[in-house]
Amino acid sequence: MKIGVSYIFLCFLTACASPQVSASAIAKIKDPTAGPPHVFGSYNAGCIGGAKGLQVSGDGYQAMRTSRNRYYGHPSLVQLIAQAGVLFGKDSPLLIGDVAQPRGGPMPSGHASHQIGLDADIWLQRVPQWNEQFREKLEFQTVVRADGKAVDPNLWRAEYGEWIKWFANQPGVERIFVNPAIKKRLCEDYNQAAWLKQIRPWFGHDEHFHVRMRCPSDQPKCRGQVAPAGIECGKELDSWFEPQPAPDPNKPPTPRPYPTLPSECKGVFDAPAALHDHSFNEPY
């Protein structure tokens, strides 16, 4: 299937100039499309054709929460995870959280990003004795102290820093999101290392780190981000630990606006499914 021509034809038939397909409808799509990868849009508003599924039980890694069907990504990301598993998962598998849905797009819960198959969550947890029940039932384990100002020395492991360092130094990785306390620890352990500029503090991310790959050079419809400019281990990082005003209990939370997706995404969501590749041992 030639994605570009077919998608344009499908858009012509379905008038998809602004394809506002609901997140719940997208989540019901069980399989990726056939053909080579095609990325449309941005990390927070996009889709992917030709995604590949992670192996559920890979060499040195385990895909977690597979019942959510969020373990699909661009082939370069799938390959990156496989390489990390071989390097770091010999004694305890890397636990891979959400990547993307089979065709990307907005998720009905959890993430604003993870929409184009270039984001992946890696749990900061080791399980030397893997049990299949862990896949759906293992609980998250924060590595950050309750006050949020530093990592918990009883739960943080030096190897976690080495995992993050390795991912940050891979050519295709654009940035990695971590809790500010984790960034603080990395700044202490890897003083002024150039790769620290790719480590970006963000709320949450206290029990996993979020790897984001840059748009592949052969994907002109993929909209990336401006590369991080500085290491930011000083005042910029300190600002994350300043007291924040308490939220107004009488003010209702602002709902997250639904993203406007690229026109090509309607064709991605409507396209025929790829034939199932049983080599990926996915749970069907």
Image (tube, rainbow, N blue to C red):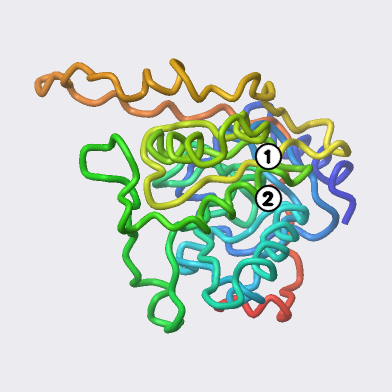
Between 186 and 74, the residue placed more toward the observer is 186
> Where residue 145 is drawn, which disc sits there?
none
Q: Earlier in the sequence, mark 1 or mark 2?
A: 1
Q: Amino acid at mark 1?
A: Cys
> Where residue 265 is drawn, which disc sits there?
1
Between 242 and 253, the residue placed more toward the observer is 242
Residue 173 x, y percent position in the rendering: 70, 41
Total number of numbered discs in the rendering: 2
> Where residue 270 is drawn, which disc sits there?
2
Q: Based on the displayed image, in which of its 4 quarters is residue 229 positioned? A: top right
Q: Residue at x 84, y 57 (%)?
A: 35
Residue 239 x, y percent position in the rendering: 37, 18
Q: Residue at x 72, y 63 (%)?
A: 83
Height in image: 267 above or below 92? Answer: above
Label 1 with label 2: CB-CB less than 8 Å: no
Q: Amino acid at mark 2?
A: Asp
Residue 109 x, y percent position in the rendering: 39, 47
- The quadrant the N terminus occupies is bottom right
- SS category of the residue bearing label 2: helix
